Amino acid sequence: TQVCIAAEIGMEHNLGLTCDPVAGQVQVPCIERNAIASVKAVNAARMALRRTSEPRVCLDKVIETMYETGKDMNAKYR
């Protein structure tokens, strides 16, 4: 359960973010975003370990929303 809570915390704040092409390459912002995401993952794990209540948003809903957003997104931003 704590793993799912940590995943939900870590993923929910990335919904709708695109890898905006810089000079035609999506790698530049994604590399920096992934570095920041690694720090967020550690913090999400710490928060999940300390959480005493159920999350308001479940991991399944976050994954479903992320999937639907990805399908709707223009291919050049994926």
Image: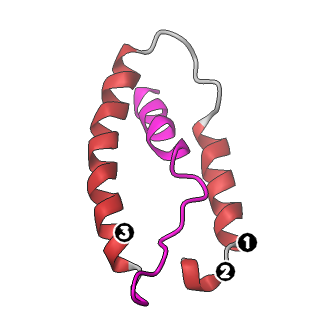
Report if the CB atoms under discs 2 and 1 are less than 8 Å apart: no
Looking at the rendered structure, the secondary structure element under dot 1 is helix
Please provide the residue range marked out in magenta: 1-25
Residue toward you, 20 or 14: 20
Residue placed at 73% from the left, 71% from the top?
72
Q: Residue furthest bottom?
A: 24
| Cα distance between the residues tagged 2 and 1 | 7 Å
Q: Which residue is mark 3?
A: 30
Dot 2: what SS? loop
Disc number placed over residue 9 in the picture, else none:
none
Which of the marked residues, 3 or 1, is nearer the chain's N terminus?
Answer: 3
Residue 16 lies left or right of residue 6; in this view the side is: right
At x 47% / y 71%, what residue is drawn?
A: 19
The extreme top residue here reads 52
Amino acid marked by disc 1: Asp
Above or below, 56 against 59 in this view is above
Horizontal and vertical percent position of residue 69: 68, 63
Give the number of the disc on residue 72. Answer: 1
Left or right of 62 on screen, residue 40: left
Q: Which residue is mark 2?
A: 74
Where residue 77 appears, as percent x and y from the top left, is 56, 78
Q: Which is nearer the eye, 36 or 69?
A: 36
**SS for dot 3:** helix
Q: Residues within 10 Å of mark 2 (few under 14, many from 20)?
A: few
Q: Is residue 57 magenta?
A: no
Spot occupied by residue 56 in the image (x, y as percentages of width and height): 64, 24
Task: Pinpoint residue 4: horizontal percent, then vertical percent.
Answer: 47, 35
Label 3 packing within 10 angstroms: few (<14), some (14-19), many (20+): some
